[in-house]
Amino acid sequence: MAKQFSSIEPIHREFIGKQRIFFTASAAAEGHVNLSPKDASAFRVIDRNTVFYLDQTGSGNETAAHLLRDGRLTLMFCALNGAPMILRLYGKGRIAPRGSKEYDQLLIAHFEGPERPGARQMIVLDVEMVQSSCGYGVPRFEYLEDRTTLTRWAESKSEAELEEYRRLKNTRSIDGFQTGIDE
């Protein structure tokens, strides 16, 4: 049975720390719903009602477009091994643009070493509700290894080439909404 909480409890934080993948879900009032898998190593809990993840350059930028139009964001973690559980974080999201004061402060405070290759922005979620559920229907999977394709791709590009790629591929959503990356 699902349980709801007003903030991230210590048991939730511990569960999040054990996961290798999470999913983002966002939508505007019109257009397509976006659902994307993300590398959990890019995810950080700031406090009981604030989390963020370092977003990598990708083929689209739907979450950013939806946050600018609506702000609603749901993040979901599910146990693929160990004890079953599904954990959802609901709230309002915002973008911390790369190079902004907030971005730089989060990078320094929560990531050791240099910025990840291909880093595009940070997505910050102000958590309004946490929901846990059983996860009994989620199959068990065994972790093999991280994929390095995106990192290798980003490392092969200069900063100017990454910026050009973002201008070409990341300024508009599939529905034509602006993403906050300058055209």
Image (tube, helix red, strand yellow):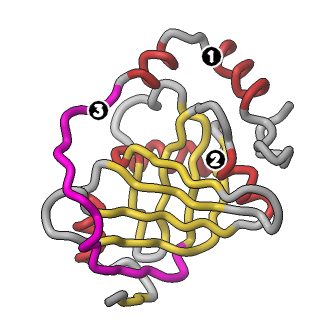
Residue under label 1: 159
- From what the image shows, is residue 42 above or below residue 7? above
Q: How far apart are marks 3 and 2 (CA)?
A: 30 Å
Q: Position of residue 171 (x, y in %)?
A: 79, 36
**Split into 4 quadrants, where in the image is the C terminus?**
top right
Look at the magenta stretch and give its main secondary structure: loop
Q: Do the residues labelled 2 and 1 touch (CB within 8 Å)?
A: no
Judge by depth and name the residue closer to the eye, 24 or 135. Answer: 135
- Three-letter code, disc 1: Glu
Q: How far apart are marks 2 and 1 (CA)?
A: 19 Å
Which of the marked residues, 2 or 1, is nearer the chain's N terminus?
2
User: As drawn, is 65 to the left or to the right of 75?
Assistant: right
User: As drawn, is 67 to the left or to the right of 156?
Assistant: right
Residue under label 2: 101
Residue under label 3: 146
Q: For the residue labelled by badge 3, is the local secondary structure a helix, a strand or a loop?
A: loop
- What range of the chain is rendered magenta? 127-147
Q: Identify the residue at horizontal 63%, vertical 38% (top origin).
A: 98
Q: Where is residue 26 in the image (x, y as percent from the top left)?
A: 64, 61
- Three-letter code, disc 3: Asp
Q: Identify the residue at horizontal 48%, vertical 51% (top origin).
A: 53
**Rendered image quadrant of residue 82:** bottom left
- Three-letter code, disc 2: Lys
Label 2 neighbour load within 10 Å: few <14, some 14-19, many 20+: few
Which of the marked residues, 3 or 1, is nearer the chain's N terminus?
3
- From what the image shows, is residue 115 above or below residue 88? above
Q: Is residue 132 magenta?
A: yes
**Rendered image quadrant of residue 87:** bottom left
Q: For the residue labelled by badge 1, is the local secondary structure a helix, a strand or a loop?
A: helix
Q: Identify the residue at horizontal 28%, vertical 72% (top origin).
A: 135
Label 1 neighbour load within 10 Å: few <14, some 14-19, many 20+: few
Q: Identify the residue at horizontal 34%, vertical 45% (top origin).
A: 41
